[in-house]
Image: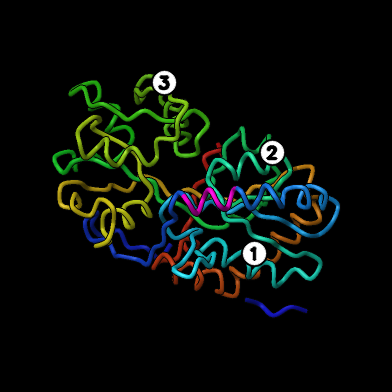
């Protein structure tokens, strides 16, 4: 038997945020990773009936989920938790391929990867398309990114009300993106008080930083990890703007790894869930998350947007 190898977050003030260790990936690293996976793709797809599970890992977004450290070693909260799961699964072996956010999905659908890590929320579309374990691999804190003068906003309802009264603009979002889904769910539940925004074909989760700073839009969405990594951290890309903006917590949403329905079976999903449950029960999952995030995302009740 192999040896066993992200919510104690106190949001007492939006401005009282703790800095956590972070890593980033340059475009050249992503490109080389994509080239590497193309050469390995045949082996991965041909191993669909085996217990060798190839996982595409998104390193294209600065954060602490999956990233390459100074020695180009793949690490982060999610991949280290997956390694701990792997140690519990005698019948399976995981292989990790660092790549881009988009390539994770392309790779899963093409069968190049059996699974993928991309900090994914559950959506109805994803539930239909992918095989998804029952156990969340972590959680993301969704918040509003605004200038300080709009720091009195506390909810999606506030944003919708202020759009009507003051004409606030909400940044454009990509159709089908996980971060778009919470707003879509709110709009479905509040047909008479919807947030108005435009859809785009581009992933705008990175662009929102500059858009709010330069005033192109009044309100955007950002994950807590984005705020910590890009603003609070002294070496963050937007640290110079940290005193001009605020991040306002809105929701805590569970995130899951995704798998190709034709490349894994229910036996694997059950084994994965059982191992992850054990890691949570023993506290090892929490310790791994605290190491990277500085808090425990498993401690409190986590919202799944697909639940009624």
Q: Nearer the viewer, residue 144 or 79?
A: 79
Q: Position of residue 233 (x, y in %)?
A: 28, 61
Labels 2 and 3: the sequence-earlier one = 2
Labels 2 and 1: the sequence-earlier one = 2
Q: Which residues are magenta?
A: 28-34
Residue where numbered disc 3 is placed: 191
Discs 2/1, front: 2
74 left or right, relative to 239: right
Specify the principal SS of the magenta part: helix
Discs 2/3, front: 2
Q: Residue at x 66, y 67 (%)?
A: 85
Quadrant of the snapshot with the C terminus: top right
How far, Cα to Cα, is label 2 from label 3? 34 Å
Residue where numbered disc 1 is placed: 276
Q: Are marks 2 and 3 in contact (CB under 8 Å)?
A: no
Residue where numbered disc 2 is placed: 109
Q: Position of residue 10 (x, y in %)?
A: 32, 63
For the residue carrying disc 3, how many other residues have a C-alpha within 10 Å: few (<14), some (14-19), or many (20+)?
A: few
């Amino acid at each position: 038997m192999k040896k066993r190898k992200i919510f104690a977050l106190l949001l007492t003030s939006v401005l009282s945020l703790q800095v956590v260790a972070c890593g980033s990936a340059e475009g050249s690293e992503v490109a080389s990773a994509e080239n590497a996976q193309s050469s390995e793709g045949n082996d991965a797809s041909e191993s669909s009936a085996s217990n060798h599970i190839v996982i595409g890992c998104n390193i294209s977004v600065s954060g602490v989920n999956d990233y390459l450290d100074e020695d180009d070693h793949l690490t982060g909260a999610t991949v280290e938790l997956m390694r701990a799961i792997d140690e519990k699964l005698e019948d399976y072996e995981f292989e990790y391929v660092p790549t881009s956010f988009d390539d994770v999905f392309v790779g899963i659908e093409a069968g190049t990867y059996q699974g993928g890590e991309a900090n994914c929320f559950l959506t109805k579309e994803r539930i239909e398309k992918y095989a998804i374990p029952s156990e969340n691999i972590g959680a993301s804190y969704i918040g509003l990114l605004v200038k300080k003068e709009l720091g009195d906003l506390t909810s999606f309802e506030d944003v919708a009300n202020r759009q009507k009264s003051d004409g606030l603009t909400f940044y454009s979002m990509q159709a089908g993106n996980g971060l778009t889904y919470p707003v879509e769910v709110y709009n479905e539940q509040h047909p008479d008080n919807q947030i108005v925004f435009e859809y785009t074909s581009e992933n705008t989760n990175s662009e929102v930083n500059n858009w709010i700073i330069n005033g192109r839009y009044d309100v955007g969405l950002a994950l807590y990890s984005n705020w910590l990594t890009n603003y609070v951290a002294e070496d963050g890309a937007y640290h110079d703007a940290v005193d001009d903006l605020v991040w306002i917590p809105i929701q805590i949403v569970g995130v899951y790894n995704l798998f190709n329905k034709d490349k894994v079976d229910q036996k694997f999903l059950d084994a994965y869930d059982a191992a992850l449950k054990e890691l949570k029960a023993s506290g090892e999952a929490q310790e791994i998350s605290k190491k990277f995030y500085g808090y425990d995302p498993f401690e409190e009740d986590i919202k799944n947007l697909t639940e009624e």
